[in-house]
Amino acid sequence: MGVSVGFSSTHLPILPVFLLYFAALFCLDIIKLCFSDANISILCLDSEREGLLSFKTTLTDPSGRLSSWTGEECCKWSGIECSNRTGLTSLKYLNLGFVKLDSAGTDWLQALNKLSALVELRLHWCKLQVPLSLPFINFTSLSVLDLSENSFNSEIPEWLFNLTSLSKLYLRWNFFNGPIPGEFANLKLLEVLDLSDNLDLGGEIPSFFGNLSRLKSLDLSANNLNSEIQEFLGGFSNRPNNLVFLDLSSNSLEGELPESLGNLKNLKFLVLFGNSFWGSIPSSIGSLSSLKTLDLSYNRMNGTIPQSFGQLSELVHADLMENSWTGILSEAHMMKLGRLEYVRITTEPTRYLVFNVSYKWVPPFRLKFIHFDNCLVGPFFPVWLQVQSELASVSLRNAGISDTIPGDWFSKLSSQITYLILSNNQIQGKLPHHLEFPNLRALDLGSNHFEGPFPVWSTNASEISLQDNLFSGSLPENIGSLVPRLQRLYLSWNRLDGKVPSSMCELEDLQVLSLRSNKLYGELPNCWHKSRMLWGIDMSNNTLTGSIPSSFGSLASLSVLMLNNNNLDGEIPSSLQNCTGLTSIDLGGNRFSGNLPLRRPIAAAIGFCRGEINGSRGERHVIYVVFRPVLGNLRWGS
Ligand SMILES: *[C@@H]1O[C@H](CO)[C@@H](O)[C@H](O)[C@H]1NC(C)=O
Ligand SMILES: *[C@@H]1O[C@H](CO)[C@@H](O)[C@H](O)[C@H]1NC(C)=O
Ligand SMILES: *[C@@H]1O[C@H](CO)[C@@H](O)[C@H](O)[C@H]1NC(C)=O
Ligand SMILES: *[C@@H]1O[C@H](CO)[C@@H](O)[C@H](O)[C@H]1NC(C)=O
Ligand SMILES: *[C@@H]1O[C@H](CO)[C@@H](O)[C@H](O)[C@H]1NC(C)=O
Ligand SMILES: *[C@@H]1O[C@H](CO)[C@@H](O)[C@H](O)[C@H]1NC(C)=O
Ligand SMILES: *[C@@H]1O[C@H](CO)[C@@H](O)[C@H](O)[C@H]1NC(C)=O
Ligand SMILES: *[C@@H]1O[C@H](CO)[C@@H](O)[C@H](O)[C@H]1NC(C)=O
Ligand SMILES: *[C@@H]1O[C@H](CO)[C@@H](O)[C@H](O)[C@H]1NC(C)=O
Ligand SMILES: *[C@@H]1O[C@H](CO)[C@@H](O)[C@H](O)[C@H]1NC(C)=O
């Protein structure tokens, strides 16, 4: 039986030919052309083969996808799939994702509508315009439709609701506005609906979703939905449902989470971050026995976490950060969390969530990630934490720990840890001296009672804070090679003495160097030619001597320079004129002489807050400013 080569069929309207041309060009391996069956061993006819070969000459094929287009059996060529049915009208599957079709106006829809056998149509990021209505619906077999990322900027078009065979509908990032139309309820076979990132879909989440008994995945995230979700969940109360994935994140939803949440018994993913939900987690959460991911972060949850939380035996990922939790977490709250790997619970500093487990409790989980900021975990450094052998990220900021930490905990952790934050506790003791942290990115042990020498740890971390502790002794001479990728170093408020080692100048990525209020002495090294990113230096309140290194003038990014309260003297180097980005400078409490060689704009800023220095012959210069900036993570204190 004769087969027409798809691309030249006279039944085809012009536009699909154009579309198919691009489809073949860009999406060759996903377009399936359906040809009829000649019921002989070679399905492909001469005329088809010739047609395809002449089509091939019109294509550029840099990736060589068409190299298989040789030989007699064109049904085996790459990108071609022959079926046993007749004619191109049985084209079933068309993917033109990422092909710019903006010149097609709105005619594309009329043209595609004639492909009545089309089952799957993907037009993701095609710069399409969408007509709001269609005079007739012919592609009623359509089961999968992807129109995402086309920026339609309109209401959701009505003709969609006549596509009653749809099982998967992707409409994300189209700037659809208005409420969610009730007509979605017509799409009774719907399994997947993605309306995310339209930003402007408003109003409430309707209850009819509960009537779509096949619905597995509902994504309404990143819109402007602003109701409570009582009614929406109520829709699921009367019949069994198959909802596995629910994402309502980044909306303006509010109210308490109702007990009817427990109706969604098959949920594996519940993502509600970035709303205004408040109150407690309903105890029905415990009946979501398949739940793997729970994300309630960035809400206003100001109640408790129920004991039934401990029943979520499939839970892997729990993110409850940035809320105002209160109450108690006991062993029962974690009883069956054997699969938990990632847990983040942070609350406000004033609203303690109390961790109350027995000292020797052995937890069912093996965590990789634990962030419990502002939760009362102490006073002891818990055994359940010490036995976690796979930790990659730990944050226990302000957790009320006033214990010592066994040295071998740091060594056991060192090979895998990426973030280690234990700041704002009262942890005591010394740190192991030599360790390597190959994966570390940030270390913050600030505001504790650590003592002993500065740890000689070798790491490619970009941030280290040991400030506000009792570290003593000098900085390692080879600090430049120990921490070569360091960007921010906070060592203020310790008891460090000795000189600032010249290898500090080797830190080419250094941005912030904070050494305030130590006992550093001697002259500053004059080698600051490499630190192109260094914008903040605070060495105030030490006993540094000598003059300001002239090479500070090569710090092109320097914005904040605090050298006050030292024993520096001499003339201020004229090279500082090169630091045109300086906004805050404090040189007070030293014995400088001469002029302040700064350019006009800075001098003007300086006039804002005047101080004085006494020259060597007793003359006075009004030169310095005292700003107390709080710039990013640069904590200057008061
Ligand atoms: C076409 O029909 C043949 C014989 O009936 C069968 O073996 C083959 O699987 C069919 N191909 C397709 C794509 O349906
Ligand atoms: C709808 O598709 C059928 C089957 O291909 C065709 O016969 C009919 O003409 C089409 N109708 C319109 C209005 O295109
Ligand atoms: C869509 O369906 C509605 C009824 O559900 C019907 O009134 C309307 O004519 C249909 N529209 C088209 C274009 O088929
Ligand atoms: C949903 O189903 C209920 C009955 O289970 C029915 O009363 C209601 O009208 C249905 N809603 C829609 C929008 O179909
Ligand atoms: C929790 O927040 C809600 C809404 O802001 C408020 O009405 C309620 O009193 C708060 N409850 C507690 C225990 O603070
Ligand atoms: C902590 O648990 C112990 C034993 O289970 C109990 O006696 C104590 O009251 C609990 N403390 C708090 C603050 O709940
Ligand atoms: C830091 O990175 C360099 C180069 O990628 C690597 O050779 C070195 O071993 C790393 N240092 C540590 C402590 O992991
Ligand atoms: C300066 O440092 C000393 C300790 O070296 C400290 O006691 C004092 O409070 C610091 N002063 C200021 C103003 O930070
Ligand atoms: C400062 O700038 C001048 C002229 O732009 C340049 O000659 C001099 O080398 C610079 N000084 C430093 C320390 O970079
Ligand atoms: C400068 O000298 C005057 C008078 O001797 C003195 O009061 C003042 O404290 C001195 N200022 C500084 C910054 O040393």
Image (spheres, rainbow, N blue to C red):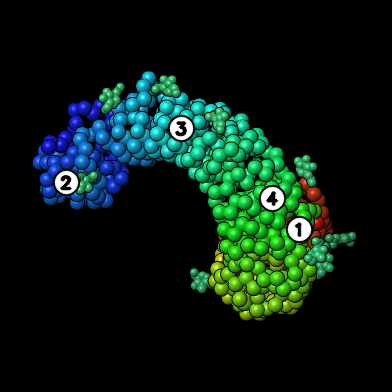
Instruction: First in sequence, mark 4 or 1: give its number.
Output: 4
Which percent across, then down, holds residue 242? 51, 44
Disc ID at residue 187: 3
The kind of secondary structure element at disc 1 is: strand
Is 605 or 366 nearer to us in this picture? 366
Which percent across, then down, holds residue 524? 68, 70
- Residue 521 visible, this angle: no
Disc ID at residue 35: none
The kind of secondary structure element at disc 3 is: loop
* Mark 1 CB within 8 Å of ligand 6: yes
Residue placed under numbered mark 1 in the picture: 328
Query: Residues at badges 1 and 2 in contact (C-beta under 8 Å)?
Result: no
Residue placed under numbered mark 4 in the picture: 283
Residue at mark 2 to residue at mark 4: CA–CA distance = 61 Å
- Which circle, 2 or 4, is nearer the viewer? 4
Residue at mark 4 to residue at mark 1: CA–CA distance = 14 Å
The extreme top residue here reads 135
Q: Is residue 557 above or below residue 565?
A: above
Residue type at numbered disc 4: Ser
Residue placed under numbered mark 2 in the picture: 74
Query: Which of the 4 quarters of the picture holds residue 543?
Result: bottom right
